[in-house]
Amino acid sequence: MAYRRGAFIGLEINPECISAVELGPPGREIILKRYGKIEPSPLLINPSLIDENIKDAENFKVVIRGLFNSAGINSRNISLALPDSSVKVSFLEFGDIPDDRGKIIELIKWNLKKTLPFPPDEASVDFQVIDTPSKESRSYRLLVVLTRKAVLAQYESLLNACNLYPDVIVPSSFAVYNFYHDSFSEDEVCALLMLSRNRVTVMVARHGKLCFYRNKETGDEKDSFREILASLNYYYDIYGDMPVAAYLIAGGFESAGFRAEIERHFGGITVKHISMDNIVKGVDPSMDTFSGAAGAALRDDNNS
């Protein structure tokens, strides 16, 4: 991946932590120029696919302005990573799709209307075609990310009031995946395992393309481990194989025990701990909380 020159601003919003970074990558090297984070007060952010997420708008604006001021980040245009619980991620298959992007979105909304907790016309939809008809499959396979328009509108309105204007909006785990995915071999099936205080996310890429996503709320460490096993078994039920490598972001858990248990349970998987210092020079593993904001900020030259 070749990164564009210039400043990149990323903001990741989650109930436990709000983080912002400014990246200024010359050439192919990522440089962390400015950064800051804050732990918001409890219940300030209540992630939801259905309802507005911010319960105290004025306090939220104070927090965001304070974060950017303390970090010394001045740019107005940002990339935003939202809580995973505020979006719906689906993989859909169609025998054929229209040439027009708008018509594809209407097809997606029609397909998902029975599973949505709100009317389809209230949905904001983005998608990526990840597979086209071939000898192995006769279908188009789409990765779909859907958010309720009212949820997006609240975030955008409050950030605009802070003189911040999101030009890219992604789920938090997708931002983290974007930050680390160049570490994955495109010749292998690789998994990214993300653990946090109360949530587990498992993402799998085949030949460099994301093909599996599962995000679940969990309790203690044992519950998180069980969810990883369930997710990888679910992936196996779909594809009939297992990742040969898994990259673990432990999020405060004891990663060595997790790695050993996953390798013991599945046998053929090599599990490696990965952290921000593997990607960015001059930082330490304690800065992993910035990987979501950094992943949102990054742009591929071919996709900018």
Image (cartoon, helix red, strand yellow):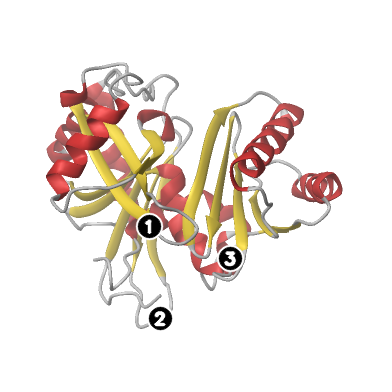
Left-right relation of 74 to 66: left
Give the mark toward the camera: 2 or 1: 1
Tell me where residue 241 appears, x and y as whole percent. Answer: 68, 52
User: Is residue 18 shown to the viewer in this render?
Assistant: yes
Identify the image quadrant of residue 72: bottom left
- Measure the C-alpha gap from mark 2 to mark 1: 34 Å
Q: Label 3 is placed on what type of residue?
A: Asp
Q: Residue farthest to the bottom?
A: 27
Identify the image quadrant of residue 9: bottom left
Q: Which mark is residue 277?
A: 3
Left-right relation of 37 to 160: right
Q: Label 1 is placed on what type of residue?
A: Pro
Give the mark toward the camera: 3 or 2: 2
Residue, x 59% and y 28% (percent of image)? 198
Judging by the rendered image, the residue that carries numbered circle 2 is 28
Q: Label 2 is placed on what type of residue?
A: Arg
Residue, x 36% and y 20% (percent of image)? 115
Q: Which mark is residue 133?
A: 1
